[in-house]
Image (cartoon, rainbow, N blue to C red):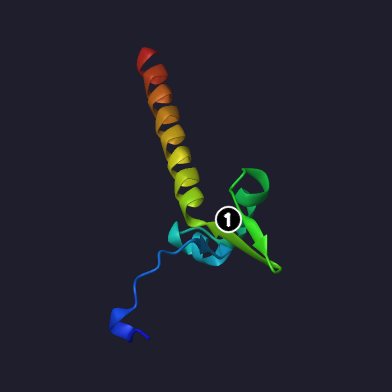
């Protein structure tokens, strides 16, 4: 048996909704809205909701890229006026 010093680090695979919300500084209510209305990936296990970490990061990054594209387009339109 390994001692505490020898235990290998196991990467986190899923967040609870509260943990995911805190990680991006939004309310749990907002996060659940994203799940319901905007396709944030999640699954249920034994009656609890879990959000896969890898898919959560990807989903957040995609929205950040889309937001930056939107800002760039808006700035271009305003410049051309």
Q: Residue 51 at x, y = what percent?
A: 56, 57
Q: Classify 10 Å Cα crowding around label 1: few (below 14), some (14-19), many (20 and above).
A: many
Q: Quadrant of residue 50?
A: bottom right
Q: Secondary structure at mark 1?
A: helix
> Is the residue 5 above or below the residue 58 in the image?
below
Farthest-out residue, right:
47
Nearest to the observer: residue 32 or residue 48: 48
Residue ID at (45%, 56%): 24
> Is the residue 30 above or below the residue 38 in the image?
below
Q: How many marks?
A: 1
Residue ID at (50%, 49%): 55
Nearest to the observer: residue 32 or residue 2: 2
Q: Residue 14 at x, y = what percent?
A: 52, 61
Residue ID at (50%, 58%): 26
Farthest-out residue, front:
1
Q: Quadrant of the C terminus?
A: top left
Farthest-out residue, top:
80
Residue ID at (61%, 54%): 42
| Circle 1 residue | 31
Nearest to the observer: residue 73 or residue 64: 64
Q: Residue 54 at x, y = what percent?
A: 46, 51
- Left or right of 47 in this view: 62: left
Q: Quadrant of the N terminus?
A: bottom left
Nearest to the observer: residue 58 or residue 21: 58
């Amino acid at each position: 048996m390994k001692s505490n010093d020898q235990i290998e680090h196991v990467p986190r695979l899923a967040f609870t909704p509260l943990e995911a919300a805190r990680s991006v500084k939004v309310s749990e209510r907002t996060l659940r809205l994203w799940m319901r209305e905007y396709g944030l990936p999640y699954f249920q296990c034994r009656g609890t909701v879990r959000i896969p970490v890898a898919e959560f990061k990807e989903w957040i990054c995609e929205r950040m890229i889309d937001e930056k594209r939107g800002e760039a387009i808006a700035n271009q339109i305003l410049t051309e006026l």
